[in-house]
Amino acid sequence: MNTMNFLKKLLDGVDVEWQPLGDVGEFIRGNGMQKKDFVESGFPAIHYGQIHTKYSLSATKTFSYVSEQLARSLKKAKQNDLLLATTSENDEDVVKPLAWLGDQVVISGDMMLFRHGQDVKYLAYFFQTNEFQEQKRKYITGAKIRRVSSSDLTKIIAPIPCPENPTKSLEIQAEIVRVLDTFTDLTADLTAELTAELTARQKQYSYYRDQLLSFEEGEAEWKKLGEVCDFKNGFAFKSNLFRDNGLPIVRITNVDGRKINLSDVKYFNPADYREDTTAYSVEHGDILVAMSGATTGKIGFYDHKSTAYLNQRVGKFLPKKRILNNRYLYHYLLSKVDDIYVIAGGGAQPNLSSNALMDKIAIPIPYPDDPKKSLAKQDRIVAVLDRFDTIANSIREGLPHEIKLRQKQYEHYRNLLFSFPKPEEVTA
């Protein structure tokens, strides 16, 4: 798509004026409504936090309601109003837009509605552009909670095609919206397609894993993990001694349920400790488990060449090599994540005991009286499951990258479609 030619043809010689939002429309602050005011049915309502969590670019229906009595005292948005969440914990999401296309709806405090005569989705798309973000940034205030005032928003300039001809202007805006809607839909379709493919591959892997780890009577003997495997608890590295470089520490947040993700890793210097930290090393092929917090029970295969070190509340399995294949143990543990979580107590603060884990989780050992035959069987099972695991997770790892590329492509065209020359650029 040649965006410049598209815009030139679309504008057909008409000018685009960059106008202060205060001249384009009126900002009206919300008031008084809180989440505790929500009821099962009543008058449609939107809380500012929902713009961040529940809505995309536009909507016609709400997720929440307030009583008719309360609604009478609240500010109301109407069709074609632009709703804005004026507070956030990060700069990017301050003044996040929602194009309202439905009937009357009440709005909460910490948000505004912008009433105007433009295409509301055109404005919503503009509020997502780099141009708007750059203008907005200089007006953001607050420390932990970031916000922008209505008086400052009125100063931000927006591109309005031929404002002296509202009918033509709305036609141009609608065409830009159509193109961006198409890109949005294509991105969403691709995401859904790739996600469905990933889900199918993961189900296929789980099916064959369960089949291959099911044995006929007499083919396998169930052994407690403690009988075929040792276990190593982590070391209490001190958070106040974490460094930006040095030797990497594997924490519970690095255990992602399949592997050890070192994209967000802390480091330490052995000289900071009297203890021998080498005893807590993690090498390629080690299998780790998260033992507390939200990731409790999740398994991670350490697939890195460099040595890392085991933090507290992360455990390492040490399978007895003459009995148990390391990857066989890994695939089996992936099927027991929920059981491990239950052993940890579940709930809000799960806490896994290594003794309970090694005593209550059992693993099938094929042909236990013939170690050579047993390991050969385990090798064959691992070979099959590794192939399925590779297929499933090549999609898993490629999915975010592909989606990110599509999102960047979409953002690129969105920014170009709003790259109208400003007065100073025309003069120059």
Image (cartoon, rainbow, N blue to C red):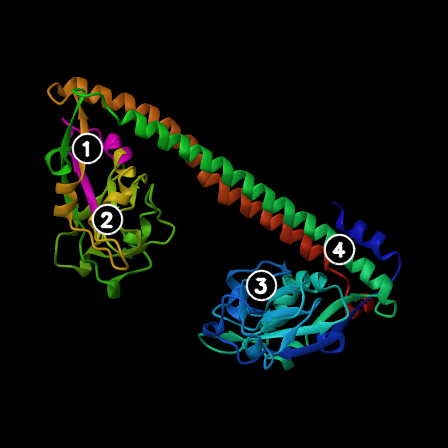
Label 4 vs label 3, nearer the camera: 3
Q: In this view, does 138 lie to the left or right of 398?
A: right
Mark 4, residue position: 176
Q: Which amino acid does label 1 sit on?
A: Ile
Q: What element carries label 3?
A: loop
Q: Position of residue 272 (x, y in %)?
A: 19, 61
User: Dot 4: within a 10 Å radius of its alpha carbon, few (fewer than 14), some, or many (20 or more) residues?
Assistant: many
C-alpha separation, residue under disc 1 versus residue under disc 2: 17 Å
Q: Which of marks 2 and 3 is nearer the N terminus?
A: 3
User: Residue 342: which disc?
Assistant: 2
Q: Residue 244 carries which label?
A: none
In the picture of the structure, the residue carrying the numbered disc 3 is 62
Distance from the alpha carbon under mark 1 to that under mark 4: 60 Å
Asked if the residue at tag 2 contacts the one at tag 1, i.e. Cβ–Cβ closer than 8 Å, the answer is no
Is label 1 or label 4 in front?
1
Left or right placement of residue 222 versus residue 3 in this view: left
State whether residue 302 is above or below residue 144: above
Q: Which amino acid lies under the numbered mark 3 shown in the image of this protein?
A: Thr
- Quick one: label 4 or label 2, which is nearer the N terminus? 4
Residue 320 in magenta stretch: yes
Q: Give whichever of discs 1 and 2 has the lower sequence position.
A: 2
Q: Mark 1 or mark 3, which has the lower sequence index?
A: 3
Q: Do tag 1 and tag 3 residues touch (Cβ < 8 Å)? A: no
Task: Please report the bounds of the magenta region as a residue range.
Answer: 314-331
Q: Can residue 308 be seen from the camera position used here?
A: no
The quadrant of the rendering that contains the N terminus is top right
Give the Cα separation between the discs numbered 4 and 2. Answer: 53 Å
The picture quadrant where one finds residue 119 is bottom right
